[in-house]
Each structure stands twice: as structure tokens, then as C-alpha cells.
Image (spheres, rainbow, N blue to C red):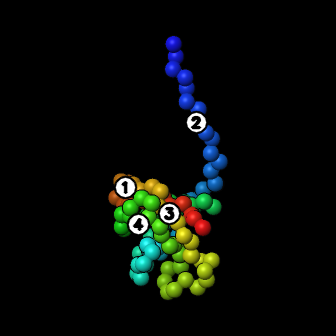
């Protein structure tokens, strides 16, 4: 007798846009911003590269300005790290997935 197949729920995913732009991020309580760069972005989150490994479920404050204090509250987004990996080609770098929150 065949085992019953598990049904996988289909989840609507936001359209991703390949977009390479600089960003800065920090964790709550951190004064200094760390640099990063988007790989792709959607309405619900983004994939970005970083020089630092960040723990899963960490909350981040992200701004797409490259220097200074964020000019507008709308230029800063809250996000949660939901994925992390090492990219091996063409160079090794840390890649993080973050889901926008709030």
C-alpha cells in the first residue's frame, strides 16, 4: 500500500527584484552601523551580503542610506534574520535573508 502524500501548502511569495544597492544595518542597542549590499529585494524582505555572521531570528534595523543618520523614519526598516549561508562563487561571502517586520 502506498504511503499517503503530504500536501504542501502553496504560499504566495512577493515578487523579488534583483537589485544591488548599499545598505547599513545594526542590531538593537548597537550604535555603529555595519555595511552590506542587497542581492534581491521584495515587498516582504530581502537577501543581502554582509561581512558579519548574524544569528537567526536576530532583529535588525536597516537603512538604505550609505552615511549619516537616517533622514526619515521611512528610510529605516525593521527586519528579522530568517536565513543565512555562505556563498562560494565568485568569492566567499556571508549572505543573509531578512523578513521585514512592523
**Mark 1 vs mark 2: which is more N-terminal?**
2
Give the x, y percent position of residue 20: 52, 66
Q: Is residue 39 visible?
A: no
Which residue is tagged 1? 86
- Please state the horizontal and vertical placement of residue 23, each as a whole percent of the image: 50, 73
Q: Which circle's residue, 1 or 4, is located before the other in the chain? A: 4
Q: Is residue 70 visible?
A: yes
Query: Based on the displayed image, in which of its 4 quarters is residue 74 positioned?
Result: bottom right
Q: For mark 3, what is the residue? A: 80
Q: CA gap, disc 2 to disc 3?
A: 24 Å
In this view, the residue in front, 31 or 95, is: 31
Q: Nearer the viewer, mark 3 or mark 4?
A: 3
Tell me the CA gap for discs 2 and 4.
32 Å
- For residue 77, the mark is none
**Earlier sequence position, callout 3 versus callout 4:** 4
Q: Which residue is mark 4?
A: 50
Query: Which quadrant is home to the C terminus?
Result: bottom right
80 relative to 31 in the view: left or right: right
Residue at position x 55%, y 23% from top?
4
Helix, strand or loop status at disc 1: strand
Amino acid at each position: 500500500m502506498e504511503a499517503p502524500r503530504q500536501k504542501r501548502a502553496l504560499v504566495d511569495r512577493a515578487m523579488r527584484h534583483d537589485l544591488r544597492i548599499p545598505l547599513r544595518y545594526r542590531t538593537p542597542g548597537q550604535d555603529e552601523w555595519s555595511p552590506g549590499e542587497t542581492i534581491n529585494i521584495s515587498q516582504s524582505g530581502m537577501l543581502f551580503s554582509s561581512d558579519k555572521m548574524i544569528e537567526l531570528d536576530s532583529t535588525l534595523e536597516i537603512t538604505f542610506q550609505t552615511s549619516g543618520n537616517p533622514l526619515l523614519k521611512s528610510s529605516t526598516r525593521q527586519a528579522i534574520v530568517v536565513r543565512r549561508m555562505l556563498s562560494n562563487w565568485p568569492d566567499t561571502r556571508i549572505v543573509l535573508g531578512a523578513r521585514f517586520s512592523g
